[in-house]
Image (spheres, rainbow, N blue to C red):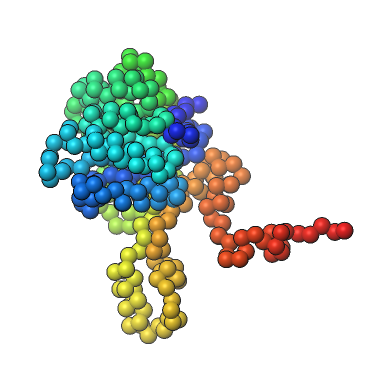
Amino acid sequence: MTQTLVESKTKTAIIGFDQPFCVIGERINPTGRKKLAAELEAGDFSTVEKDALAQVAAGATVLDINAGVVYNSNPNPNETEPPLMRKIIELVQGLVDVPLCIDSSVPGALEAGLEVCEGRPLLNSVTGEEERLEQILPLVKKYNVPVVAISNDDTGISEDPDVRFAVAKKIVERAADFGIPAHDIVVDPLVMPVGAMGTAGLQVFALVRRLREELGVNTTCGASNISFGLPNRHGINNAFLPMAMGAGMTSAIMNPVALPIGPKKIAEKRAEIEAAGIILPEGMDDEAFVQIFGMGSTLPRAGKEMEAIRAANFLTNNDPHGGEWIKANKAPPKAGEESRGRGGRAGGRRRRA
């Protein structure tokens, strides 16, 4: 069975047909995040630190690192992105011990990341564009790392799934010319928004099956693309991920964290409750309040997408005996009960004399 090994200094994540689904945390990426972009330009890495810790706690097995900030002081990413990529990778490696995915459209930033990354990172990404193939595949070979292969080429992104398959096949064949094996290619077949193309889900499921059966490669995707522009995106994502897994998809670049409920929403809900004449207990803290009224949590926690993935792992026997499912859903012990054994007695059941 095809297995792609992604490694940190001491840990290995296996992307494979007979392995638990690999969750690649996407949060360390300034694209569309103005606050994070401004922090990074100012040399503030506090959000990066929080995102790294929260994603691993939520269940990410690999972290994607993207340093694509367009500096106001210098708009040239070829100059600014390589040193920033180095800094972020060194910082994240000092916080968490999970494999990394180095994500950039700037070849210099990819190589800068490869130079400082411990273990065997996943490189994100190569496309079927001729210039990109000539720039990235030598890096993949030089550093002996796996790579994400995105199914678009010099003609752009095709809506025809047969064309996207042909691009993936071309990348796999060109990689072989460099001595890069198919098991080190993780194909992104490109998920289209279902709101714009009603067959988008069916297309990607069929593509994933072909990529697995005909090319023998692992697959990934930007999972949230499927729900772009639609209401209740989590509901669509929660259905999409297990269906993609059932079709043979082996990883996804996604957000594993349910973002915490902020004070503004809490205040609005409290006002709504008070207006309805509901009297709350004195001294109820915000966390108890949001839990009681089903709002979520004031703390980062695993999102519903992670729940769907863990359930699918269990149902496909990639979570033997449901160990991870039970662990994730086991209530934490109450204060003072941590050392109590079975039957509620401290130290467990006594033996008979």
User: x%, y% of residue 8?
Assistant: 43, 34
Decide if residue 113 is on the left or right side of residue 318. Answer: left
Assign the C terminus to one quadrant of the image.
bottom right
**In this view of the protein, which residue sits in the foreground, 285 or 328?**
285
Residue occupying image coordinates x 42% and y 73%: 285
User: x%, y% of residue 28?
Assistant: 31, 45
Q: Name above or below for residue 247 compared with residue 299.
A: above
Decide if residue 143 is on the left or right side of residue 39. Answer: right
Q: Name above or below for residue 32 compared with residue 181.
A: below
Determine which quarter of the picture holds residue 98.
top left
Decide if residue 196 is on the left or right side of residue 117. Answer: left
Residue occupying image coordinates x 25% and y 38%: 84
One can see residue 263 in this view: yes
Q: Name above or below for residue 234 compared with residue 85.
A: below
Residue occupying image coordinates x 36% and y 79%: 273
**In this view of the protein, which residue sits in the foreground, 176 or 235?**
176
